[in-house]
Image: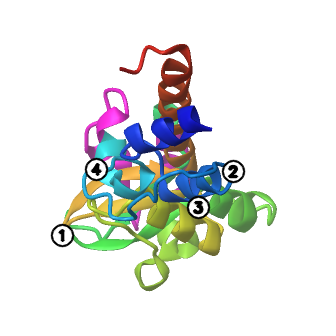
């Protein structure tokens, strides 16, 4: 038990508080662990900006958006060409005015299954409009982004800091979670092996 107590105390900045509290329940005479962890790093402190930085070779560019008067066919072609599932929709003539978002789901539900012509349908006719658009800023933490996606049942969220900064998807969020958990497991393994000190 003393070993576990020392482990908890020495790694308190690595473990998240709920894990520490659970471990503490099973250790006798373990010193109390302070709940103030100022410099802890974890998903609670991982921002959308950090997730965007991990995306390979992705820079903000015209491949992230289309115009509301474009055809759905052109928008779908652009998504397929760039292997992405959504595009931010801009108002014609103004690169900074966001009109909404178009996703693969919009295409499937509003064009394909209704047997509409994608070449004769405009993006503005099927997009999710700006007033219903869910966005995040680059300083939003990953948990908040994941919660927004889950609550709204969406897979893509534009990152807007006064202008389009990028786009994150549920895949990006899950990848960040898996990476963080892998790092925690590696640190635990190092500690168990005695390599932590």
Which of 71/182 is in front?
A: 182
Q: CA distance from mark 4 to mark 3?
A: 37 Å
Tell me whether the residue at label 4 lies in contact with that at label 1, contact meaning CB atoms closer than 8 angstroms. Answer: no
Q: Can you tell which of label 4 and label 3 is closer to the viewer? A: 4
Residue 150's place in the image compared with 53, above or below, is: below
Residue 15 position, x and y percent, is 47, 45
Q: Does the magenta segment cover residue 107?
A: no
Q: CA distance from mark 4 to mark 1?
A: 14 Å
Pointer 4 or 1: first along the chain: 4
Q: Crowdedness of circle 2 by 10 Å Cα count: few (<14), some, many (20+)? A: few
Mark 3, residue position: 120
Mark 4, residue position: 49
Residue 48 position, x and y percent, is 35, 53
Pointer 3 or 1: first along the chain: 3
Q: Can you tell which of label 1 and label 2 is closer to the viewer? A: 2
Q: Give the quadrant of residue 33.
A: bottom left
Pointer 4 or 2: first along the chain: 2
Q: Can you tell which of label 4 and label 2 is closer to the viewer? A: 2
Residue 167 position, x and y percent, is 39, 52
Residue 54's place in the image compared with 30, above or below, is: above
Q: Is residue 180 visible?
A: yes
Q: Which residues are magenta?
A: 53-80
Q: Residue at x 53, y 70 (%)?
A: 148
- Horizontal side of 4 relative to 74 (left or right) equals right
Mark 1, residue position: 162
Q: CA distance from mark 3 to mark 1?
A: 32 Å
Local SS, label 3: loop
Q: Crowdedness of circle 3 by 10 Å Cα count: few (<14), some, many (20+)? A: few
Q: Crowdedness of circle 4 by 10 Å Cα count: few (<14), some, many (20+)? A: some
Pointer 4 or 3: first along the chain: 4
Q: In the rendered view of the protein, which quadrant contains the N terminus?
A: top right
């Amino acid at each position: 038990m003393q070993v576990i107590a020392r482990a908890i105390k020495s790694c308190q900045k690595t473990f998240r508080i709920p894990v520490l509290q659970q471990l503490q329940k099973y250790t006798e005479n373990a010193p109390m662990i302070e709940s103030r962890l100022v410099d802890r790093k974890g998903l609670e402190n991982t921002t959308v900006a950090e997730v965007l930085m991990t995306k390979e070779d992705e820079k903000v560019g015209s491949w992230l958006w289309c115009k509301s008067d474009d055809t759905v066919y052109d928008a779908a072609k652009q998504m397929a060409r760039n292997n992405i599932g959504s595009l931010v929709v801009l108002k014609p003539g103004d690169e900074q005015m966001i009109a909404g978002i178009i996703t693969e789901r919009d295409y499937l539900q509003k064009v394909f299954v209704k047997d509409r012509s994608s070449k004769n349908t405009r993006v503005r006719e099927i997009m999710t409009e700006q007033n219903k658009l869910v966005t995040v800023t680059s300083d939003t933490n990953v948990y908040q982004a994941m919660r927004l996606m889950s609550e709204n049942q969406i897979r893509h969220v534009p990152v807007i800091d006064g202008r389009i900064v990028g786009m994150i998807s549920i895949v990006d969020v899950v990848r960040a979670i898996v990476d963080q958990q892998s790092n925690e497991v590696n640190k635990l393994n190092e500690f168990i092996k005695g390599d932590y000190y």
